[in-house]
Image: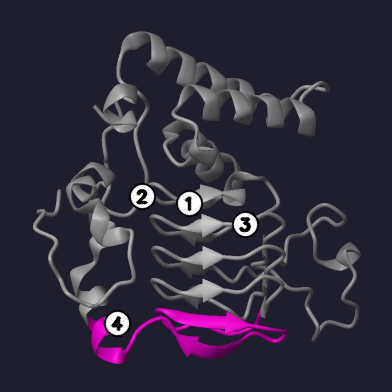
Amino acid sequence: MSRLQQNGYAQYSARNSLQYPKGWFMTLIGKLLYKLYGLNAPFCNLLYHEVIRKIIVKLEGGGKGMYSGTLRRIMKDYYDVEIGAYSRGYCFEPGCAERFTKIGRYCSVAPNVHIITINHPMDFKSMHEFAWHPDESDTDLREWSPIDIGNDVWIGRDVIILPKCMHIGDGAVIGAGAVVTRDVPPFAIVVGNPARVVRYRFEPEVIAQLVQEKWWEHDLEELLPDIEEFRKPYAGVCSFKGELTN
């Protein structure tokens, strides 16, 4: 029995995440922690929220948030950040991604990544927040730039993704320290400031095959029988025999 079975998770979307653990007790604990996280009280500081997140990760399978449904709900409802199933890492830290960020399935996010979805208005008389930011003024003139990050994307340490980047393709690699200012194609490897494509992970025909196969739409348990295919250099041979879940 896998950790997913042991924790009683069920997939509720082909794109996005996992449910609460089954069983009345674990369901109650998950809902309680979710509510506690959203309290607006003087003691609800950064440390308070960090402790709750660590408890949730411990109770819901570990893996740096990989298996946690409650954590995904917190990120979506409290931060407007959607994180797909089995993605893991720093993406569950508040401040990593700003509002209207969508992260696909099976992504890996290293520490100190910053995904920015809003700019200062450079065409205003002043760029200072006193005129346009709701924290400092009586109006909200912010213009958000949503970003959609694909599946099986690896984002390295200290990466900065700026608002002009609105899409990162499936299977892409963002090298450590890169500053991403434009969209990234599927399976591209980008590095530098500004980030540029240095190569692709596979030949074009192999990329086309993987994009068509969409292995990341499968539940983890469906992939385990073919786990050896994921533990060696990929030769582009499609041998996966599983069926997609609805």
Q: Which residue is mark 4?
A: 207
Q: Earlier in the sequence, mark 4 or mark 1?
A: 1
Q: Earlier in the sequence, mark 2 or mark 3?
A: 2
Q: Is residue 159 above or below residue 87?
A: below
**Are discs 3 and 1 less than 8 Å apart at CB?**
no
Quote the CA–CA distance across marks 2 and 1: 7 Å
**Are discs 2 and 1 less than 8 Å apart at CB?**
yes
Q: Which residue is mark 2?
A: 16
Task: Report helix, strand or loop for mark 3.
Answer: loop
Near-viewer residue (221 or 87): 221
Residue drawn at 30 percent across, 90 percent down: 204
Q: Is residue 48 above or below residue 159?
A: above
Badge 3, how many Cα within 10 Å: few under 14, some, many 20+? some
Q: Earlier in the sequence, mark 3 or mark 1?
A: 1
Task: Report helix, strand or loop for mark 4.
Answer: helix
Q: Is residue 195 above or below residue 45?
A: below
Quote the CA–CA distance across marks 2 and 3: 20 Å
User: Which mark is on residue 110?
Assistant: 3
Observer able to see residue 181: yes
Picture mark count: 4
Q: Which residue is mark 1?
A: 82
Residues in magenta, as a range: 180-208
Q: Earlier in the sequence, mark 2 or mark 1?
A: 2
